[in-house]
C-alpha cells in the first residue's frame, strides 16, 4: 500500500516537517502576554520585540532548539508579599514560542528600556539553478 504525501499530494516530497509544524500550530492557542511586535528591518531580517517591563536579564531566557525559538520569563519569586492599592502591571511568568523556517538563525537578543529585541537573519543563500548529471548503469 502506498503512503500519500503530505496534504494528500504525491508530488510534494520531503514536506513531512511542514505538515508536523502545521499540526503543532493548530494545537496552540494564541498568547497575548507579553505584547509583541514582529517587524522586517531589512531584506532577510526579522525582529521580534517583546514588552517585558519589570523583567531583569537574569529572569529572561532565549533558547533556540530544533528550529523553535523559545522566549521565557520567570515571574517574581514566590513568597514576596506586597500590599497593592491598585495592581495594573502584570508580573507573571510567560513563555512564547516561534517556529523558524530552515535557514533562519537568531543573531542577537538585547534588553533595553523594558523591550527585549531578538534579531533573526536568513542565512540561506539565494536560490540556484543546478544541472543534475545522469549516469547509466
Image (tube, grey):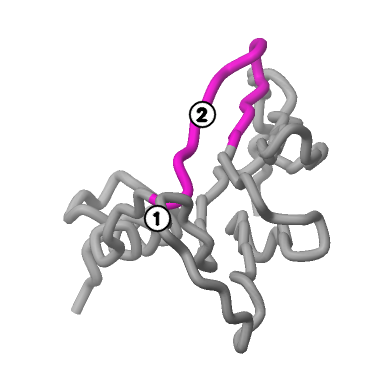
**Frontmost residue, 111 versus 81:** 81
> Is residue 45 located in the magenta-colored stretch of the structure?
yes
Q: Is residue 123 left or right of residue 40?
A: right
Which quadrant, please, contains the C terminus? bottom right
Q: Can you tell which quarter of the image residue 116 is in?
A: top right
Q: Are marks 1 and 2 in contact (CB under 8 Å)?
A: no
- The boundaries of the magenta stretch are 33-49
Q: Residues within 10 Å of mark 2 (few under 14, many from 20)?
A: few
The residue beneath circle 1 is 86
Q: Residue at x 45, y 59 (%)?
A: 17
Q: Position of residue 118 (x, y in %)?
A: 70, 38
**Frontmost residue, 105 versus 75:** 75
Q: Residue at x 45, y 54 (%)?
A: 14
Q: Is residue 95 left or right of residue 25?
A: right
Q: Disc 1 versus disc 2: distance between alpha carbons?
A: 31 Å
> Is residue 39 located in the magenta-colored stretch of the structure?
yes
Q: Residue at x 64, y 20 (%)?
A: 127
The residue beneath circle 2 is 38
Q: Is residue 48 above or below residue 129?
A: below
Which quadrant, please, contains the N terminus? bottom left
Q: Is residue 112 left or right of residue 99?
A: right
**Frontmost residue, 73 versus 42:** 73
Q: Is residue 100 above or below residue 77?
A: above
**Numbered disc 1: secondary structure:** loop
Q: Position of residue 133 (x, y in %)?
A: 69, 33
Q: Position of residue 113 (x, y in %)?
A: 73, 33
Q: Residues within 10 Å of mark 1 (few under 14, many from 20)?
A: few
Amino acid at each position: 500500500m502506498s503512503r500519500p504525501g503530505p496534504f494528500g499530494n504525491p508530488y510534494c516530497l520531503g514536506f513531512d516537517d511542514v505538515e508536523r509544524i502545521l499540526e503543532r500550530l493548530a494545537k496552540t492557542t494564541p498568547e497575548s502576554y507579553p505584547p509583541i511586535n514582529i517587524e522586517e528591518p531589512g531584506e532577510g531580517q526579522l525582529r521580534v520585540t517583546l514588552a517585558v517591563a519589570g523583567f531583569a536579564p537574569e529572569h529572561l531566557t532565549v533558547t533556540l532548539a530544533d528550529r523553535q525559538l523559545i522566549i521565557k520569563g520567570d515571574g517574581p519569586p514566590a513568597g514576596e508579599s506586597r500590599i497593592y492599592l491598585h495592581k495594573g502591571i502584570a508580573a507573571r511568568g510567560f513563555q512564547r514560542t516561534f517556529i523558524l523556517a530552515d535557514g533562519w538563525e537568531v543573531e542577537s537578543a538585547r534588553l533595553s528600556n523594558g523591550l527585549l529585541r531578538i534579531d533573526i537573519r536568513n542565512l540561506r543563500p539565494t536560490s540556484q539553478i543546478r544541472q543534475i548529471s545522469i549516469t547509466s548503469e
